[in-house]
Image (cartoon, helix red, strand yellow):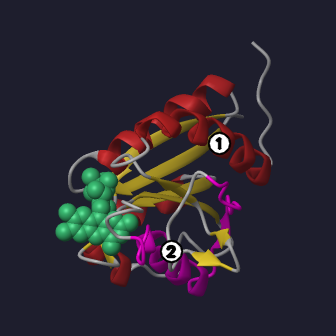
Amino acid sequence: MTAKIGIYFGSSTGCTERIASLLKAEIEATGAATCEVMVISVANAKTFSNYDFLMFGGSTWNIGELQDDWAIALPTLTSAGLKGKKVALFGCGDQFGYSNSFVDAIGIIGERVTQLGAQTVGWIVPDSSYQYEFSRAAFEGVMMGLPIDEDNQAPLTPQRIVNWVHWVLEEFGLQPVAA
Ligand SMILES: Cc1cc2nc3c(=O)[nH]c(=O)nc-3n(C[C@H](O)[C@H](O)[C@H](O)COP(=O)(O)O)c2cc1C
Protein backbone atom coordinates (compact mmCIF):
# COMPACT_ATOMS: atom_id res chain seq x y z
CA MET A 1 0.00 0.00 0.00
CA THR A 2 1.27 3.48 -0.85
CA ALA A 3 2.42 5.51 2.13
CA LYS A 4 0.50 8.63 3.05
CA ILE A 5 2.21 11.86 4.03
CA GLY A 6 0.42 14.77 5.69
CA ILE A 7 2.01 18.12 4.81
CA TYR A 8 0.91 20.85 7.23
CA PHE A 9 1.88 24.47 6.72
CA GLY A 10 1.45 27.93 8.22
CA SER A 11 1.99 30.80 5.80
CA SER A 12 1.12 34.51 5.87
CA THR A 13 2.05 35.65 2.36
CA GLY A 14 1.86 32.31 0.57
CA CYS A 15 5.53 31.37 0.42
CA THR A 16 5.48 28.32 2.69
CA GLU A 17 2.14 27.29 1.22
CA ARG A 18 3.69 27.24 -2.25
CA ILE A 19 6.67 25.24 -1.00
CA ALA A 20 4.26 22.71 0.54
CA SER A 21 2.63 22.24 -2.87
CA LEU A 22 6.01 21.87 -4.58
CA LEU A 23 7.02 19.23 -2.03
CA LYS A 24 3.81 17.30 -2.68
CA ALA A 25 4.42 17.42 -6.46
CA GLU A 26 8.04 16.32 -6.10
CA ILE A 27 7.20 13.45 -3.75
CA GLU A 28 4.26 12.20 -5.78
CA ALA A 29 6.36 12.30 -8.97
CA THR A 30 8.55 9.62 -7.39
CA GLY A 31 5.56 7.35 -6.82
CA ALA A 32 6.83 6.70 -3.29
CA ALA A 33 3.87 8.22 -1.44
CA THR A 34 0.73 10.27 -1.76
CA CYS A 35 0.50 13.62 0.04
CA GLU A 36 -2.21 15.82 1.40
CA VAL A 37 -1.43 19.48 1.96
CA MET A 38 -3.34 21.48 4.58
CA VAL A 39 -2.99 24.49 6.78
CA ILE A 40 -1.93 23.78 10.35
CA SER A 41 -4.90 24.60 12.49
CA VAL A 42 -6.15 23.23 15.78
CA ALA A 43 -8.72 21.17 13.87
CA ASN A 44 -6.27 19.79 11.32
CA ALA A 45 -3.78 18.88 14.04
CA LYS A 46 -6.24 16.22 15.14
CA THR A 47 -5.68 14.42 11.83
CA PHE A 48 -1.97 13.53 12.29
CA SER A 49 -2.78 9.90 12.97
CA ASN A 50 -4.27 9.55 9.46
CA TYR A 51 -0.74 9.69 8.02
CA ASP A 52 2.30 7.43 8.02
CA PHE A 53 4.64 10.42 7.97
CA LEU A 54 4.32 14.13 8.58
CA MET A 55 5.89 17.27 7.17
CA PHE A 56 5.56 20.58 9.03
CA GLY A 57 6.32 23.89 7.33
CA GLY A 58 6.26 27.31 8.92
CA SER A 59 7.68 30.73 8.14
CA THR A 60 9.31 33.04 10.68
CA TRP A 61 7.92 36.48 11.49
CA ASN A 62 8.58 39.42 13.82
CA ILE A 63 12.22 38.51 14.35
CA GLY A 64 12.32 34.91 15.41
CA GLU A 65 8.63 34.24 16.01
CA LEU A 66 6.22 31.67 14.68
CA GLN A 67 3.85 32.51 11.84
CA ASP A 68 0.30 33.11 13.15
CA ASP A 69 -1.28 29.71 12.32
CA TRP A 70 1.58 27.90 14.05
CA ALA A 71 1.53 30.32 16.98
CA ILE A 72 -2.04 29.21 17.66
CA ALA A 73 -1.70 25.52 16.86
CA LEU A 74 1.69 24.62 18.35
CA PRO A 75 0.74 25.12 22.04
CA THR A 76 -2.30 22.87 21.55
CA LEU A 77 -0.33 19.90 20.17
CA THR A 78 -0.10 16.80 22.32
CA SER A 79 1.80 13.59 21.84
CA ALA A 80 -1.33 11.99 20.34
CA GLY A 81 -0.57 11.37 16.71
CA LEU A 82 3.03 12.54 17.15
CA LYS A 83 4.67 10.05 19.49
CA GLY A 84 7.04 7.87 17.48
CA LYS A 85 6.15 9.62 14.23
CA LYS A 86 8.76 10.79 11.75
CA VAL A 87 8.32 14.50 11.03
CA ALA A 88 10.27 16.45 8.39
CA LEU A 89 10.46 20.22 8.85
CA PHE A 90 10.72 23.05 6.36
CA GLY A 91 10.16 26.77 6.32
CA CYS A 92 10.61 30.07 4.53
CA GLY A 93 12.68 32.97 5.79
CA ASP A 94 14.86 35.89 4.77
CA GLN A 95 18.52 35.25 5.55
CA PHE A 96 19.71 38.76 4.69
CA GLY A 97 16.90 40.80 6.25
CA TYR A 98 16.81 38.61 9.38
CA SER A 99 20.27 37.08 9.46
CA ASN A 100 20.21 36.37 13.20
CA SER A 101 16.82 34.66 13.27
CA PHE A 102 16.79 32.91 9.91
CA VAL A 103 14.00 30.29 9.77
CA ASP A 104 13.86 30.19 13.56
CA ALA A 105 10.35 28.74 13.29
CA ILE A 106 11.81 25.45 12.05
CA GLY A 107 13.71 25.23 15.33
CA ILE A 108 10.75 26.26 17.49
CA ILE A 109 8.43 23.71 15.88
CA GLY A 110 11.13 21.04 15.90
CA GLU A 111 11.94 21.49 19.58
CA ARG A 112 8.29 21.16 20.55
CA VAL A 113 7.44 18.12 18.45
CA THR A 114 10.59 16.42 19.71
CA GLN A 115 9.42 17.03 23.30
CA LEU A 116 6.12 15.43 22.29
CA GLY A 117 7.87 12.27 21.15
CA ALA A 118 8.21 12.80 17.40
CA GLN A 119 11.43 12.04 15.54
CA THR A 120 12.56 14.89 13.32
CA VAL A 121 14.14 13.83 10.02
CA GLY A 122 15.47 15.72 7.01
CA TRP A 123 18.30 17.46 8.85
CA ILE A 124 20.82 18.96 6.44
CA VAL A 125 24.21 20.61 6.46
CA PRO A 126 23.52 23.86 4.62
CA ASP A 127 25.78 24.39 1.60
CA SER A 128 27.71 27.62 1.03
CA SER A 129 24.79 29.26 -0.78
CA TYR A 130 23.29 30.00 2.63
CA GLN A 131 24.77 33.05 4.36
CA TYR A 132 22.76 33.60 7.55
CA GLU A 133 24.50 34.40 10.84
CA PHE A 134 22.33 32.51 13.31
CA SER A 135 19.31 30.24 13.29
CA ARG A 136 17.47 28.59 16.15
CA ALA A 137 17.01 25.69 13.75
CA ALA A 138 20.76 25.04 13.49
CA PHE A 139 22.74 22.85 15.84
CA GLU A 140 26.50 22.77 15.39
CA GLY A 141 25.98 23.80 11.80
CA VAL A 142 23.28 21.24 11.02
CA MET A 143 19.80 22.50 10.15
CA MET A 144 16.82 20.73 11.60
CA GLY A 145 14.98 20.89 8.28
CA LEU A 146 14.87 22.59 4.90
CA PRO A 147 15.37 26.38 4.91
CA ILE A 148 13.92 28.14 1.87
CA ASP A 149 14.65 31.78 1.07
CA GLU A 150 12.31 32.94 -1.67
CA ASP A 151 12.96 36.58 -0.73
CA ASN A 152 16.58 36.40 -1.90
CA GLN A 153 17.32 33.06 -3.54
CA ALA A 154 14.20 31.91 -5.36
CA PRO A 155 16.18 30.41 -8.29
CA LEU A 156 17.81 27.99 -5.84
CA THR A 157 14.50 26.67 -4.51
CA PRO A 158 13.71 23.95 -7.09
CA GLN A 159 17.05 22.16 -6.65
CA ARG A 160 16.92 22.53 -2.86
CA ILE A 161 13.54 20.83 -2.92
CA VAL A 162 14.69 18.00 -5.19
CA ASN A 163 17.74 17.29 -3.02
CA TRP A 164 15.83 17.44 0.25
CA VAL A 165 12.91 15.29 -0.92
CA HIS A 166 15.37 12.61 -1.99
CA TRP A 167 16.95 12.67 1.49
CA VAL A 168 13.64 12.76 3.40
CA LEU A 169 12.16 9.84 1.46
CA GLU A 170 15.24 7.84 2.31
CA GLU A 171 14.81 8.69 6.00
CA PHE A 172 11.13 7.81 5.80
CA GLY A 173 12.25 4.46 4.37
CA LEU A 174 10.33 5.01 1.14
CA GLN A 175 11.56 3.91 -2.28
CA PRO A 176 10.81 5.69 -5.55
CA VAL A 177 8.61 3.49 -7.74
CA ALA A 178 9.89 2.93 -11.27
CA ALA A 179 7.45 4.24 -13.88
C1 LIG B 1 8.22 42.01 9.76
C2 LIG B 1 8.89 40.76 9.22
C3 LIG B 1 9.63 39.97 10.09
C4 LIG B 1 10.30 38.83 9.62
N1 LIG B 1 11.09 38.09 10.49
C5 LIG B 1 11.82 37.07 9.98
C6 LIG B 1 12.73 36.37 10.82
O1 LIG B 1 12.90 36.64 12.00
N2 LIG B 1 13.43 35.33 10.27
C7 LIG B 1 13.31 34.98 8.95
O2 LIG B 1 13.99 34.06 8.51
N3 LIG B 1 12.45 35.64 8.13
C8 LIG B 1 11.71 36.68 8.60
N4 LIG B 1 10.85 37.35 7.79
C9 LIG B 1 10.74 36.94 6.36
C10 LIG B 1 9.57 35.99 6.08
O3 LIG B 1 9.64 34.83 6.89
C11 LIG B 1 9.62 35.58 4.61
O4 LIG B 1 9.24 36.69 3.81
C12 LIG B 1 8.81 34.35 4.26
O5 LIG B 1 9.03 34.03 2.90
C13 LIG B 1 7.32 34.50 4.52
O6 LIG B 1 6.71 33.25 4.31
P1 LIG B 1 5.12 33.01 4.32
O7 LIG B 1 4.55 33.78 3.17
O8 LIG B 1 4.97 31.56 4.15
O9 LIG B 1 4.60 33.50 5.63
C14 LIG B 1 10.18 38.49 8.24
C15 LIG B 1 9.41 39.30 7.39
C16 LIG B 1 8.79 40.43 7.85
C17 LIG B 1 8.03 41.28 6.89
Query: Dot 2, crowdedness within 10 Å: few (<14), some or many (≥20)?
Result: few
Task: Quarter of the image for the N terminus: give it.
Answer: top right
As drawn, is 165 to the left or to the right of 74?
right
Query: Is 169 or 167 nearer to us in this picture?
Result: 167
Query: Dot 1, crowdedness within 10 Å: few (<14), some or many (≥20)?
Result: many
Rendered location of residue 42, percent (x, y): 29, 69
Residue found at the very far top of the displayed protein: 179
Q: Residue at x 65, y 46 (%)?
A: 164
Q: Residue at x 28, y 76 (%)?
A: 71
- Identify the disc placed on residue 133: 2
Q: Which residue is mark 1?
A: 165
Q: SS for tag 1?
A: helix
On whether ligand 1 comes within 8 Å of the CB at mark 2, the answer is: no
Q: Residue at x 75, y 12 (%)?
A: 179
Rendered location of residue 133, percent (x, y): 50, 74
Rendered location of residue 55, percent (x, y): 53, 55
As drawn, is 144 to the left or to the right of 158?
right
In the rendered image, residue 43 lying in the magenta stretch gets the answer no
Q: Is residue 42 visible?
A: no
In the rendered image, residue 124 lying in the magenta stretch gets the answer yes
Query: Is 173 or 95 nearer to us in this picture?
Result: 95
Give the answer, above or below, for where 104 lies relative to 171.
Answer: below
For discs 2 and 1, the disc positioned in front in the rendered view: 2
Query: Is 51 or 21 nearer to us in this picture?
Result: 21
- Identify the disc placed on residue 36: none
Quadrant of the displayed image that contains ligand 1: bottom left
Mark before the other along the chain sequence, 2 or 1? 2
Disc 2 marks which amino acid?
Glu
Rendered location of residue 105, percent (x, y): 41, 72
Q: Residue at x 69, y 60 (%)?
A: 124
Disc 1 marks which amino acid?
Val
Magenta residue span: 99-128
